[in-house]
Image (cartoon, rainbow, N blue to C red):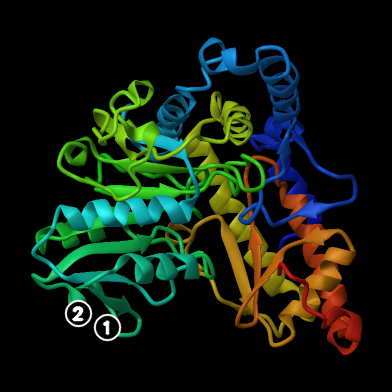
Amino acid sequence: MLSREECADLDRDDPLAYMRDRFILPEGVIYLDGNSLGPLPKAAVATLSHTVEQEWGQGLIRSWDDAGWFDLPQRLGDRLGRLIGAAPGQVVACDGTSINLYKTLRAALSLRPDRRTILAEAGSFPTDLYIIEGAAEGHRTRLLGRDGDTLDDLLDDDVAVVVLSHVDYRSGALLDMRELTHKAHRAGALVIWDLCHSAGVVPVELDACEVDFAVGCSYKYLNGGPGAPAFLYAAHRHHEASRHPLTGWWGHAAPFAFERDFRPQDGIRRFLTGTQPILGLKGVEAALQLYDDVDLAALRAKSRALGDSFIALVEQHPDCAALQLASPRDSAVRGSQVAFTFPHGYAVIRAMIEQGVIGDFREPGLMRFGLAPLYLRHTDLFDAVEIMADCLRRQVWTDPKYQTRAAVT
């Protein structure tokens, strides 16, 4: 049995405890939804205020040069590269994950013109499947979990691109990036990895795993702000030969020459499209400062420990006996979230939020909890489980007010 006193001991020994004070966390709230939207870093307030009042307010259009706005996508991309194992010149912060997936998918397909199959996961975050459907144009799609159970079942010499999620958005299951990338390469296919639920909490080694392309968002564990720009990775070896269809002026070799025909930039900037949202990028810049002095090994160790503690706390509580673990029990193959299934999960989540514990719900029947190691404590998890147990004991799903679905669940 894990007691609250033992949780407090774990918190006292936490090498990342100092990070919690770098966030604005509302009083009386236990935030377990950082896998959907990270909280506000204190540094972001000053950064955004300076950007609005000084760089925009006083610098006006001069700030594209004087404040370095124009080069911000690649500067931030190189900083993101440290967190995802990418050498400089292979990452840009830009656009949204969906747009970046479209660009990388079409770029990868351009490198395999004689192959007509795209392989993805039936359980992918739906937008990935929607983008694949829209980008397919003459290609067929095979889905893991629908057309076969393993990559080996579906790989053949017609597969051009494999699109995989590093961490499953529902269960938190973590895939072996190195093994699956090499397996796809042996079949002659390229791989795109979706890092939305791993960047910032799970070690990622894109270069070492010889990944071709990757995409991810910055507003979850990276805490860049609601709707903050995403990022795109393209390995150096693919820059010159690949082409994507959104060839906007920011990807042009000489954008201010205003030439009629498109000439791509050298390197990663060719994957840019239009003018980037500077305020959003500045939020990402402030958030990335948090990682400047963070040991990524310690970050992952705490993430795994939080998950183990949360599972133990739920399973030891008699009032939580009806919950079924939907995440891997082994922390080595689990991202930084834990999910449980329960027939009335939505009502329980709504009731918990009313009492200050914020998690989220995903169909079908999945109560999902993000365990962000930069600001969460083991005692937070103990207290959250006590509130969860109270909601279950009271059978909150019998109250109609917890049944009405909000627009965002």
Mark sitting earlier along the chain (1/2): 1
For disc 2, the neighbor class at 10 Å (few under 14, some 14 to 19, many from 20) is: few
Please tell me how crowded label 1 is: few (under 14), some (14-19), or many (20+) other residues with Cα within 10 Å: some
Residue 54, x across and y down, in percent: 72, 15
Classify 204 as above or below 156.
Answer: above
Would you say the residues marked 1 and 2 are in contact, meaning their CB atoms lie under 8 Å apart? yes
Residue 98 horizontal side relative to residue 218, left or right: left
Residue at position x 43%, y 57% from top? 332
Up/down of 137 relative to 331, above or below: below
Q: Which residue occupies the extreme front position in the image? A: 260
Q: Secondary structure at mark 1?
A: loop
The amino acid on which the numbered mark 2 sits, given as a three-letter code, is Asp
Q: Is residue 73 above or below residue 234?
A: above
Question: Which dot marks residue 148?
Answer: 1
> SS of the residue at dot 2?
helix
Q: Position of residue 213 (x, y in %)?
A: 29, 48
Could you tell whether 203 is left or right of 6 in the image? left
Residue 153 badge = 2
At x 12%, y 67%, the residue is 115
